[in-house]
Amino acid sequence: MGDDPASRVYVNNKKKACEELGIYSEEYALAADTSEDELLELIDKLNGKKEISGILVQLPLPQHISEQNVINAINPKKDVDAFHPVNVGKIMTGNFDFVPCTPAGVMAPITQSRPAPRGKDCVVVGRSNIVGKPQAMLLLHQNGTVTICHSRTKDLAEKTKKADILVAAVGIPNFITGDMIKEGAVVIDVGINRLADKKLVGDVDFESAQTVAGAITPVPGGVGPMTIAMLMKNTIKAAEINR
Ligand code: L34
């Protein structure tokens, strides 16, 4: 909904990924002044549409729309973002169908190319419903010892410096600097911040961080594309579930 330029880029990337994989997709680009009722009606229509396995409402939404009402309206079996309370609950218990795309994208490099989080000190900076909270759960399920830090955390650097695995999801450009990172840590940067000069940077100051970290993801070309890959995975799973 609306004309957020970043959303435009992300949605285009998602459509492109669908095309590459041969996944049928429909886009509904609604005007910013569309009413909540109209949006809910569209979701209801797609809930009932047989050839649609997955529904994703790109966030953020305009001020006059309740994000929670919209998420609640999506059939949990088609909720490829895993934002619906039913799916959020399943993530808590560990028996989930859909893994939220960004946290799943963060886990992929951690579990595939590095020793598992088991027994490791994991620090997540950020506590959003979309990233920070589910991220902490996924790391916990992998037997990590998890600390969630946020804007009211005291002595943040003291906490981040203990992390074997550090996930930055605060939305502040270059917020995590090299002096806040433990030597050899795995650093995953979830932030995508566009500076005034149009340059994209993460939440981690890559320059200073890369000299300390054992491994670090870049922005762009890091978690963003992985988020989309995980969305594709969820969509295929949804197709299987709904068949
Ligand atoms: N409903 N809303 C819903 N689900 C999501 O999973 C998202 N998210 C976040 C924003 N709103 C959402 C995304 O899709 C962030 N996000 C996302 C998706 C793709 C990319 C970044 C964020 C991406 O493709 N990033 C590229 C560069 C993008 C650019 O050039 O601006 C990268 O290399 O990081």
Image: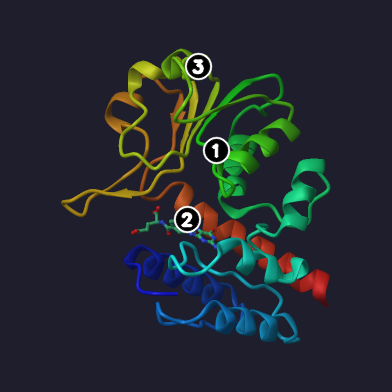
- Which of the 4 image quarters holds residue 232? bottom right
**Callout 2 crowding tier (Cα within 10 Å): few <14, some 14–19, many ≥20:** some
Residue drawn at the location 59% of the way across and 69% of the way down: 56
- Which of the 4 image quarters holds residue 235? bottom right
Q: Is residue 25 above or below residue 158?
A: below
| Place of residue 142 in the rendered image (x, y in percent of width and height, measured from the top left) | 73, 32
Residue reaching furthest to the front: 64
Q: What secondary structure is marked by label 3?
A: helix
Alpha carbon separation for disc pair 2 and 1: 22 Å
Closer to the N terminus: mark 3 or mark 2?
Answer: 3
Image quadrant where one finds the C terminus: bottom right
Amino acid tagged 2: Pro
- Judge: label 3 CB < 8 Å from ligand 1: no
Q: What secondary structure is marked by label 1?
A: loop
Mark 3 or mark 2, whichever is nearer to me: 3
Q: What secondary structure is marked by label 2?
A: helix
- Quarter of image, ligand 1: bottom left
Amino acid tagged 3: Lys
Q: Are marks 3 and 1 in contact (CB under 8 Å)?
A: no
Residue drawn at the location 37% of the way across and 67% of the way down: 9
Mark 2 or mark 1, whichever is nearer to me: 1
**Callout 1 crowding tier (Cα within 10 Å): few <14, some 14–19, many ≥20:** some
**Callout 3 crowding tier (Cα within 10 Å): few <14, some 14–19, many ≥20:** many
- The one of 38 and 123 positioned closer to us in this rendering: 38
**Residue at numbered disc 1:** 127
**Residue at numbered disc 3:** 159
Mark 3 or mark 1, whichever is nearer to me: 1
Alpha carbon separation for disc pair 3 and 2: 28 Å
**Residue at numbered disc 2:** 225
